[in-house]
């Protein structure tokens, strides 16, 4: 497995585990407004969903061979998770506000990754 796929695999697993941990913290005593709780739930849902997408990307890239399209899509999934989901979590859990302007860029990364992903598959 090439290094990028290995990184995507480790990142996806760590991201999924982190989303479960943050969900547990939020469920057991984190005092948030209703709006902040909804924003955190949405960020965690997207983090879990894109961790799963990254795992599928790794499995399919191992079967069909990685190429530029799949590597770019994987990198965009990673960047989107960091800039969107983890950024929102840091803001709500630790009041880190200075990264907030990067959230839309993360959403854009996640959005752009999807159309490019199937373009790279070798359909049989």
Image (cartoon, grey):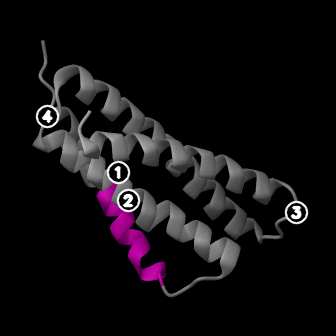
Question: On residue 29, which mark appears?
Answer: 3
Q: Is residue 29 toward the left or the right of residue 32 in the image?
A: right
Q: Disc 2 or 4, which lies upstream in sequence?
A: 2
The rendered magenta stretch, by its main secondary structure, is classed as: helix
How far is mark 2 from mark 4, CA to CA?
A: 19 Å
Q: Disc 1 or 4, which lies upstream in sequence?
A: 1
> On screen, 67 above or below 74?
above
Q: Is residue 63 toward the left or the right of residue 44 in the image?
A: left
How far is mark 1 from mark 4, CA to CA?
A: 15 Å
- Badge 2: few (under 14), some or many (20 or more) residues near its Cα, within 10 Å? many
Magenta-drawn segment: 99-111
Per the image, label 4 sits on a secondary structure element best described as loop
- Residue 101 shows in the view: yes
What residue is shown at x 59% (from left), y 53% (from top)? 44
Residue picked out by circle 2: 80
Residue picked out by circle 1: 77
Q: Are marks 2 and 1 in contact (CB under 8 Å)?
A: yes
Question: On residue 120, which mark appears?
Answer: 4
What residue is shown at x 24% (from left), y 29% (from top)? 61
Q: Disc 3 or 4, which lies upstream in sequence?
A: 3
- Badge 3: few (under 14), some or many (20 or more) residues near its Cα, within 10 Å? few
- Residue 50 shows in the view: no
Q: Quadrant of the C terminus?
A: top left
How far is mark 2 from mark 1, CA to CA?
A: 5 Å
> On screen, 2 above or below 72?
above
What residue is shown at x 88% (from left), y 63% (from top)? 29
């Amino acid at each position: 497995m090439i290094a990028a796929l290995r990184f995507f695999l480790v990142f996806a697993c760590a991201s999924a585990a982190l989303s479960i941990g943050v969900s547990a913290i939020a469920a057991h005593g984190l005092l948030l407004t209703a709006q902040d709780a909804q924003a955190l739930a949405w960020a965690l849902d997207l983090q879990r969903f894109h961790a799963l997408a990254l795992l599928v990307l790794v499995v399919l890239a191992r079967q069909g061979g990685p190429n530029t399209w799949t590597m770019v899509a994987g990198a965009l999934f990673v960047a989107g998770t960091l800039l969107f989901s983890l950024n929102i979590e840091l803001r709500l859990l630790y009041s880190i506000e200075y990264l907030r302007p990067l959230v839309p860029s993360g959403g854009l990364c996640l959005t752009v990754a999807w159309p490019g992903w199937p373009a790279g598959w070798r359909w049989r």
